Image (cartoon, helix red, strand yellow):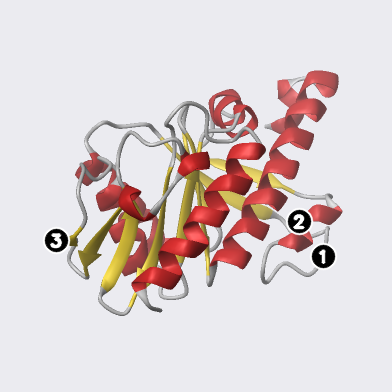
Amino acid sequence: MQNNTAISQLIEAGKWVSQKGWVPATGGNFSSRTASGFVVTASGFDKGQLGTHTFIELDHEGKRIKGAGNPSAETQLHLGMYKLIPHANVVLHTHSVAATVLSRVIKSHTLNLSGYEMQKSLSGVTSHLDTLSIPIFENDQDIERLGLLLSDHHLHTPIEHAVLIRGHGVYVVGRNYKEALRHLEGLEFLFSCELERIKIEGIEASL
């Protein structure tokens, strides 16, 4: 994909995600794979007001090609996900209340969802009876170390749709930006449903 096209798509994604309230303040970061590497949002910008000046172009190894500003500290995590997941062409990282709280409420290292029709909004899921497993990783300011944890997990259990970072938010991947947005919206609905279920049935019912 051309860099300009990727940036235009992420600008539109930012407006939509911001309207949902999933990237408060200047939180979150978005990226898209391109022919020369990938483009990623620079640090410190409201994702609802992105422009061509708010992106940094990087090569396949994460070295800057073009763009001003500081890349997010989590840029290396985006790069790592592109290297790990061949079908990932877009990565959206958001900070919704549901994703952030649920990642703390669930004490295990995996959020398992089953019985929800909306699971089928995620590519490859064909039945509400399937178990949709989203890995949860401990938050870490050392992004290189966090990336190694994702890599180790992926070796035995490939990451397909998303990962949760405890107390931080969700990273969603897609083959293109429309799929990434669909995965994000579907997962946010599922996260909200699971939180409501826990409120009614208690945390023990989710373990």
Q: Please tell me whether residue 139 is drawn above or below residue 3 in the rendered image.
A: above
Residue picked out by circle 1: 127
Amino acid type for the residue under numbered disc 3:
Lys
Q: Residue at x 35, y 71 (%)?
A: 3
Q: Residue 122: percent from the left, percent from the top?
A: 68, 62
Q: Is 67 positioned to the left or the right of 29 in the image? A: left
Tags 2 and 1 in contact by the CB under 8 Å rule? Answer: yes
Vertical comparison of 95 with 155: above or below: above
The residue lying at 77 percent from left, 50 percent from top is: 114
**Residue 186 appears at what percent x and percent y?**
71, 52
- What type is the residue that disc 1 sits on? Ser
Q: Position of residue 150 (x, y in %)?
A: 35, 52
Label whose residue precedes the other's in the sequence (2 or 1): 2
Out of 101 and 202, give the one closest to the viewer. 101
Q: Quadrant of residue 126?
A: bottom right
Q: Is residue 27 left or right of residue 19?
A: left
Q: Are marks 3 and 1 in contact (CB under 8 Å)?
A: no
Number of residues whose C-alpha sits closer than 10 Å to that of mark 3, classed few (under 14), some (14–19) or many (20 or more): few
Look at the numbered disc 1 and give the secondary structure of its residue.
loop
SS category of the residue bearing label 2: helix
Q: Nearer the viewer, residue 116 or 77?
A: 77
Counting every numbered tag in the picture gives: 3
Residue 86 percent coordinates (x, y):
41, 75
Q: Which residue lies under the disc numbered 3?
A: 63
User: Which is more foreground, mark 2 or mark 1?
Assistant: 2
Q: For mark 2, what is the residue?
A: 119
Mark 3 to mark 1: distance in Å?
41 Å
Residue 101 visible, this orientation: yes
Amino acid beneath label 2: Gln
